[in-house]
Amino acid sequence: RSALMRVFEIPTGTQKFKNLSGDSKIEVPFDLSALPPFVDVSDSMATVSLEIQPLARSSFEGIPVQLIGSYDRKAYSLIPATATVEVTGGKGALSRIRQSDIQLFIEYNRFQIEDKDSLEPTVRILQTVQSYQVHPEKFTLKREAPDAAGQMRGALNAGDIVLLGVGR
């Protein structure tokens, strides 16, 4: 009884598989070298069932790109504001992905740190996928120009000079 209480897991041997084309049941040997010598083992193999899915591709349009961090939310935005994300993975896994499972964001301070006008977003997909592509690849930080009343309007680009004065 005390020996049984100490066996929490039994590792398996390492095996590599190539070119699996369909569902399979594979026998994997246990690595019994760590077990105490007084423990008898009735089975030295584990059976693993593998479900092999064909690769598929799905496209998700209109995914919002979020600008995150500390910044004036009335003064800055991203151009464009949305993206299309093309995802490649197992057909069954892709069927479970919803548009809300895909998150795109760019940290505001990256524009200053990397000293660039446009950046690629960070991508988070809540399901496991083989690969993804974001279209467009880069997004530009847009600053609204203030009007005479101090309200933000119109685009202001790097290097633009805005003079605000009070008339008499």
Image (cartoon, helix red, strand yellow):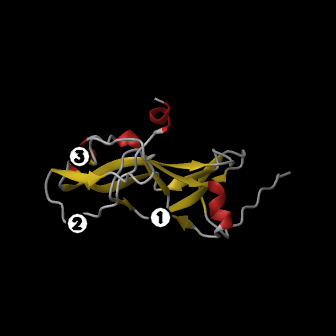
Residue that mark 3 sits on: 47
The picture quadrant where one finds residue 33 is bottom left
Residue 58 in sight: no
Q: Between residue 35 and residue 94, name the one nearer to us.
A: 35
Instruction: Check disc 1 and give the amino acid type.
Output: Lys
Q: Is residue 163 left or right of residue 147?
A: right
Estimate the x, y position of residue 23 in percent, counting from the top left.
Answer: 15, 50
Q: Please report contact status of discs 2 and 3: CB closer than 8 Å, yes or no.
A: no
Question: Which residue is at 40% across, 50% downward?
Answer: 11
Residue 38 in sight: yes
Query: Please, which residue is most extreme toward the right here?
Result: 168
Q: Earlier in the sequence, mark 1 or mark 3?
A: 3
Instruction: Report the Cα–Cα distance between label 2 and label 1.
Output: 36 Å
Classed neighbour count for the residue bearing mark 3: other residues with Cα under 10 Å, few (<14), some (14–19), many (≥20): few
Estimate the x, y position of residue 24 in percent, counting from the top left.
Answer: 16, 51
Vertical comparison of 66 with 3: above or below: below
Residue that mark 2 sits on: 18
Instruction: Report the Cα–Cα distance between label 1 and label 3.
Output: 46 Å
Identify the secondary structure beneath mark 2.
loop
Q: Is residue 145 left or right of residue 61?
A: right
Question: Which residue is at 48% across, 32% downward?
Answer: 5
Residue that mark 1 sits on: 138
Estimate the x, y position of residue 167 in percent, counting from the top left.
Answer: 82, 52
